[in-house]
Amino acid sequence: MLWGCFSAKGPGRLIRVKERMNGAMYREILSDNLLPSARALKMKRGWVFQHDNDPKHTARATKEWLRKKHFKVLEWPSQSPDLNPIENLWRELKVRVAQRQPQNITALEEICMEEWANIPATFDEPWQPGRNCFLDPVKRAGPVVLLVID
């Protein structure tokens, strides 16, 4: 399983998650990777965090952790993966990795990391008008970090 994030400024960190993820692990991943990604992407103050409605994302402990860390969280409709721009990024990563035909898990992980690093900041321009009308109001609110756990 991979965890990754991105913003309108480009991809953030990508990490391999070796165990089944629970809420505590999710919060640890956010703590270790989300803020460093935001810093590396030079996100301005006021950026908004978005994740889907996976139970570990919506757990009381996770909501409380996000509140204590002063994250602005975008409310997200249930059962709406088609609205999530990172799905385009995951699809692109899968295509790039498949083209390189990794032969084992180590090669798979290395290729995933290499291809993620090679995805340009302008990938798929998810903020283009008409591209995804749901996200137009979000664009006006400022840069958004988006993530999905696959």
Image (tube, helix red, strand yellow):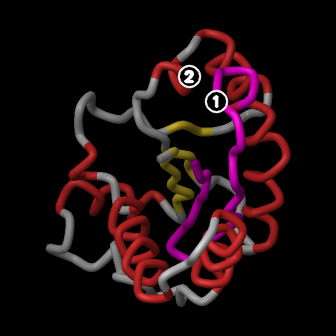
User: Are there few (<14), some (14-19), or many (20+) residues within 10 Å of tag 1?
Assistant: some
Figure quadrant of residue 110: bottom right
Q: Residue at x 54, y 85 (%)?
A: 119
- The foreground one among 131 and 111 is 111
Residue at (45% x, 57% y) in the render: 141
Q: Is residue 116 above or below residue 132?
A: below
Residue 21's tag is 1
Q: Position of residue 148 (x, y in %)?
A: 48, 48
- The magenta-colored residue range is 1-25
Q: Is residue 80 above or below residue 15?
A: above
Contact, mark 1 vs mark 2 (Cβ under 8 Å):
yes
Q: Nearer the viewer, residue 112 or 77?
A: 112
| Mark-to-mark CA distance, 1 and 2 | 8 Å
Look at label 2 and name its amino acid.
Answer: Lys
Residue 18: in magenta span:
yes
Q: Amino acid at mark 1?
A: Met
Give x and y (percent) for residue 65: 74, 22
Give the x, y percent position of residue 40.
79, 72
